[in-house]
């Protein structure tokens, strides 16, 4: 599809493959049995939500090659537009012992002779790709996924640490902004969007802010889960810390999902309860940020 949205049948089909892939250590049956697949998660270029898609891959040294064939359709796949807008990709790959390995990568679109050579290599392995190119007038893109590697580059580690702080500070600022808006709405501030503490719009306002924030946080944590693999390779002594951080990602996601459920069932007059629930949900998030910075930043800065 041309954007980051997909029609319900495509979404349902993809989700079945994703679920089977994750449940079976990276293998699937049916139409794709024996096909080398990975899952890629990109940032939706319109929605800014995480979008996960199964794609065929080809190994080329240390990088993974993926192909924007869209089965030969005239439109590029939605994930291709997403990675053009934001090339940071989180990848899930099956391992020989039946686990799923999550990796952080940067996508680079290949051109010219390199693109042609590698596409021909893929066609030799999977003749269906010959047919895909024959069906469309567009040149099917070949994209290289370069994995994050901190083992040889201390400067890259330092930059990753700076990026981590920048993301956390942005998320903290957004939390503060949401708190301020909600409390002004509860108190009936003339500058607030909601006129009174009992206005039905307060829950809707909180839901809107929370959903937007939750999607940003979900994407941030997905990307961190991929980067953590590179952290473990570079800093083996941090393995227990990273295990805890991954577990906290799951716990925080569950807490925010509970808040969304509360918002959906809320009634006018629930302003104080809603704000209290919001504050409770984000307390663990602030503690998570602090622990992550305390444990990871010293290693990344040296």
Image (spheres, rainbow, N blue to C red):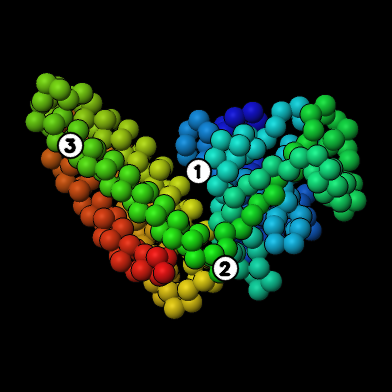
- Quadrant where the N terminus sits is top right
* SS at badge 3: helix
146 or 243, which is in the foreground? 146
- Quadrant where the C terminus sits is bottom left
Disc 1 vs disc 2: which is toward the camera?
2
Q: Quadrant of residue 183?
A: top left
Seen in the picture, residue 31 relative to 93 is either above or below; the reply is above
192 or 16, which is in the foreground? 192
Give the x, y percent position of residue 269.
13, 33
* In the displayed structure image, the side of residue 133 where residue 241 appears, left or right: left
Q: Earlier in the sequence, mark 3 or mark 1?
A: 1
Residue at (21%, 30%) from the top-left corner?
202
Q: How many marks on residues? A: 3
* In the displayed structure image, the side of residue 235 where residue 190 appears, left or right: left
* Image disc number at residue 298: none
Disc 3 vs disc 2: which is toward the camera?
2
Residue at (53%, 37%) from the top-left corner?
44
Residue at (13%, 40%) from the top-left corner?
272
The residue to which callout 1 is attached is: 50
Mark 1 Cα shell of 10 Å, populated few (<14), some (14-19), many (≥20) = many
* In the displayed structure image, the side of residue 225 where residue 5 appears, left or right: right
Give the x, y percent position of residue 17.
65, 50
287 or 186, which is in the foreground? 287
Q: Quadrant of residue 182?
A: top left
Give the x, y percent position of residue 245.
39, 65
The residue to which callout 3 is attached is: 180
The residue to which callout 2 is attached is: 152
């Amino acid at each position: 599809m041309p954007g980051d949205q997909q029609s319900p049948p495509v979404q349902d089909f993809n989700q079945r493959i994703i679920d089977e892939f994750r449940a079976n250590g990276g293998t699937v049956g049916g139409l794709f049995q024996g096909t080398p697949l990975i899952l890629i998660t990109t940032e939706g270029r319109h929605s800014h939500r995480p979008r996960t898609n199964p794609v065929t891959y080809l190994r080329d040294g240390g990088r993974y090659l993926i192909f924007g064939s869209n089965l030969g359709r005239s439109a590029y796949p939605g994930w291709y537009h997403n990675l053009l807008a934001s090339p940071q990709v989180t990848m899930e790959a099956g391992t020989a012992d039946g686990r799923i390995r999550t990796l952080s990568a940067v996508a680079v679109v290949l051109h010219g002779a390199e693109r042609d050579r590698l596409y021909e290599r893929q066609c030799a392995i999977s003749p269906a790709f010959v047919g895909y190119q024959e069906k469309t007038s567009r040149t099917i893109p070949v994209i290289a996924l370069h994995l994050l590697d901190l083992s040889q580059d201390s400067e890259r580690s330092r930059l990753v640490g700076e990026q981590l702080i920048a993301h956390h500070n942005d998320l903290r600022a957004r939390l503060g902004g949401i708190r301020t808006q909600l409390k002004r709405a509860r108190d009936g501030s003339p500058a607030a969007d909601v006129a009174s503490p009992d206005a039905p719009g307060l829950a809707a306002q909180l839901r809107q802010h929370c959903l937007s924030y939750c999607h940003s946080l979900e994407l941030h944590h997905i990307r961190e889960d991929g980067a953590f693999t590179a952290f473990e390779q570079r800093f083996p002594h941090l393995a227990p810390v990273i295990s805890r951080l991954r577990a906290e990602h799951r716990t925080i996601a569950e807490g925010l999902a509970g808040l969304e459920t509360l918002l959906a069932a809320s009634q006018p007059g629930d302003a104080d309860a809603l704000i209290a629930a919001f504050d409770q949900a984000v307390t663990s998030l602030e503690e998570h940020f602090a622990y992550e910075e305390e444990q990871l930043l010293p290693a990344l800065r040296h």
